[in-house]
Image (cartoon, grey):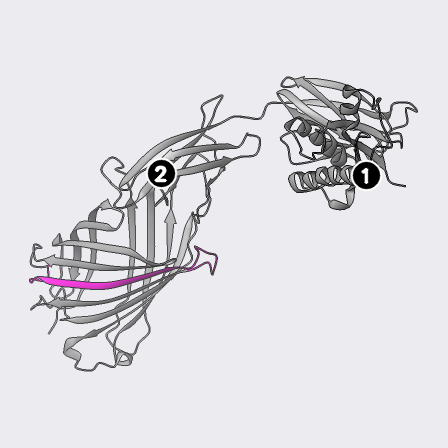
């Protein structure tokens, strides 16, 4: 007959992680018990466990692994099983939080324990087939979990798990600063098998990172820290991305400014750091396979001044609701119905553009210091609806070739076109009076059309905003009696014309 007793058993363990896929551990059991007949209370040292766990990624959110442990009979007679036992498990983990599929993680374990003849007062079971699963709701502070476990003991001779012990174990994991964590749980028997074993358990863990000893295996790992470039203090809650990568973005820790990326895709990776109130930082890091490197990312605070002012018509002084653009900034501001505006500018020289349909674009470069307030009165000139000559292109006799000198004229015309939606470009071709009149008319059209096609294709201008016309020899600007005069008349004029 097995002696009736009450007992409490605990383990103190040390685990070492030499690689990101391998853990090894040693654990020592200890306990206390009280026998009922005869009454006896004692404490002592139990058996020693040695084991290892191997794990690798299987799919994007799934890992598989192997667990193996040996229990060596080093304990005292009342605390050890008196024989060597072995346990081997197959492990599966599905992290369904990774791509926001669900907020849960699922663990599945299948194992087998091989045990020799045991001390019946301590361990009354033989070889067993194990099935265990757990549902975890992970978070940064605490993680509730629910475990399900059952086992089929070899001596039962019945492989129906409905006739095997079944336990439900609700519990809660706590995650504290400085690598401290704790778990508590209670075993609740739900099968009909007796005697029931009601157990409660608690654990306390302390993780000490040994970064200089842990070397990545086949990976490029980045340990980063975001710092304020002026104060040198850590910057928390910054967003860090690996450009042109499928890796999800990270947030720097609030207390330390640190973050970590595992398994960067290439030896050279571009890291972008963004934080409100700071300038965006883009930095290239170099990390080869089997390396883990530390980098600091110093981001510069945005130092700003304030520009306020008023936009008015140059001649009538009426207020204007103009669009205001600062070079390098995506957002666009606008003056109100009174023409007033107020915008924040980064310290240094800023290029500011004021634009409004029917008015010439107003540009200015303004220097401002941190905390400085400046006032600017913008007087915008209305555009008169008349043709405006932008430039003249000259051609050699009987040729329609565009030369390099024309590019600056094209760019000026296209810029004006983009800033003023209500205008078009007219490309007018002209010749001297040498040769046949009809031939000169056709040549002027060819020259105008070649310029039009060049502007449309090279500058992305809508074709319906560029008009080509040939005037032949009928609009000279100089005398055709001299060589110099004829050369001036062989030209293409670029004009801005208003739509009716």
Q: Are marks 1 and 2 in contact (CB under 8 Å)?
A: no
Q: Which residues are magenta?
A: 80-104
Q: In this figure, which residue is indicated by the disc labeled 2?
A: 222
Split into 4 quadrants, where in the image is the C terminus? Answer: top right
Would you say residue 253 is visible in this rendering?
no
Identity of the residue furthest to the right in this view: 316
Check if residue 310 falls in the magenta segment.
no
Q: Is residue 11 visible?
A: yes
> How far across and how far down the image is residue 292, in percent?
30, 38
Which one is earlier in the sequence, the residue at label 1 or at label 2? 2
Q: Quadrant of the N terminus?
A: bottom left
Residue 441: mark in rendering: 1
- Circle 1 crowding by C-alpha within 10 Å: few under 14, some 14–19, many from 20: some
Please tell me which residue is depicted at 68% across the width and 29% down the height of the picture: 406
Identify the secondary structure beneath mark 1: helix
Q: Which residue is at a point 79% across and 33% down the rendered structure image?
A: 435
Q: Is residue 14 left or right of residue 472?
A: left
Which one is nearer the viewer's eye here, 315 or 163? 315
């Amino acid at each position: 007959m097995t002696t009736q007793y009450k007992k409490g058993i605990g383990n103190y363990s040390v685990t070492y992680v030499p690689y990101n896929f391998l853990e090894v551990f040693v654990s020592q059991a200890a306990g206390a018990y009280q026998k009922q007949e005869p009454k006896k209370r004692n404490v002592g040292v139990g058996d020693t466990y040695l084991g290892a766990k191997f794990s690798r990624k299987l799919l994007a959110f799934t890992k598989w692994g192997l667990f193996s442990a040996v229990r060596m009979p080093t304990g005292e007679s009342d605390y050890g099983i008196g024989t060597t036992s072995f346990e081997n498990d197959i492990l599966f983990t599905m992290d369904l939080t990774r791509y926001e599929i669900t907020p849960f993680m699922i663990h599945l374990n299948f194992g087998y324990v091989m045990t020799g003849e045991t001390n019946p007062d301590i361990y009354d079971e033989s070889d067993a087939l194990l099935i265990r699963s757990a549902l975890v709701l992970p978070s940064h502070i605490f993680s509730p979990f629910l475990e399900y476990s059952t086992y089929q003991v070899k001596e039962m001779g019945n492989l129906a798990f409905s006739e095997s012990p079944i336990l439900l174990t609700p519990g809660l994991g706590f995650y504290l600063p400085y690598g401290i964590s704790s778990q508590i749980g209670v075993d609740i028997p739900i099968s009909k098998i007796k005697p029931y074993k009601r157990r409660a358990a608690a654990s306390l863990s302390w993780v000490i990172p040994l970064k200089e000893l842990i070397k990545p295996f086949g990976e490029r790992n980045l340990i980063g820290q975001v710092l304020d470039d002026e104060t040198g203090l850590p910057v928390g809650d910054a967003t860090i991305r690996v450009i042109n990568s499928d890796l999800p973005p990270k947030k720097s820790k609030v207390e330390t400014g640190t973050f970590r990326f595992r398994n960067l895709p290439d030896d050279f990776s571009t890291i972008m750091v963004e934080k409100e109130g700071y300038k965006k930082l883009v930095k290239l890091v170099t990390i080869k396979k089997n390396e883990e490197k530390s980098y600091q990312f110093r981001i510069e605070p945005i130092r700003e001044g304030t520009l306020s002012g008023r936009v008015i018509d140059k001649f009538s002084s009426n207020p204007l609701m103009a669009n205001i653009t600062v070079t390098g900034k995506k957002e666009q501001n606008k003056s109100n119905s009174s023409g007033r505006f107020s915008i924040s500018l980064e310290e240094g020289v800023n290029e500011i553009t004021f634009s409004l349909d029917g008015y010439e674009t107003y540009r200015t470069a303004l220097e401002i210091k941190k905390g400085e307030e400046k006032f600017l009165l913008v007087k915008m000139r209305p555009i008169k609806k008349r043709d405006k000559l932008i430039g003249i292109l000259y051609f050699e006799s009987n040729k329609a070739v565009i030369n390099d000198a024309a590019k600056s004229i094209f760019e000026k015309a296209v810029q004006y076109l983009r800033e003023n939606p209500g205008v078009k470009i007219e490309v007018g071709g002209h010749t001297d009076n040498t040769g046949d009149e009809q031939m000169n008319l056709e040549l002027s059209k060819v020259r105008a059309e070649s310029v039009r096609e060049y502007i449309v294709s090279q500058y992305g201008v809508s074709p319906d905003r560029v008009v080509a016309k040939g005037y032949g020899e009928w609009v000279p600007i100089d005398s055709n009696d001299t060589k110099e005069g004829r050369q001036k008349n062989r030209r293409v004029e670029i004009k801005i014309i208003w739509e009716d």
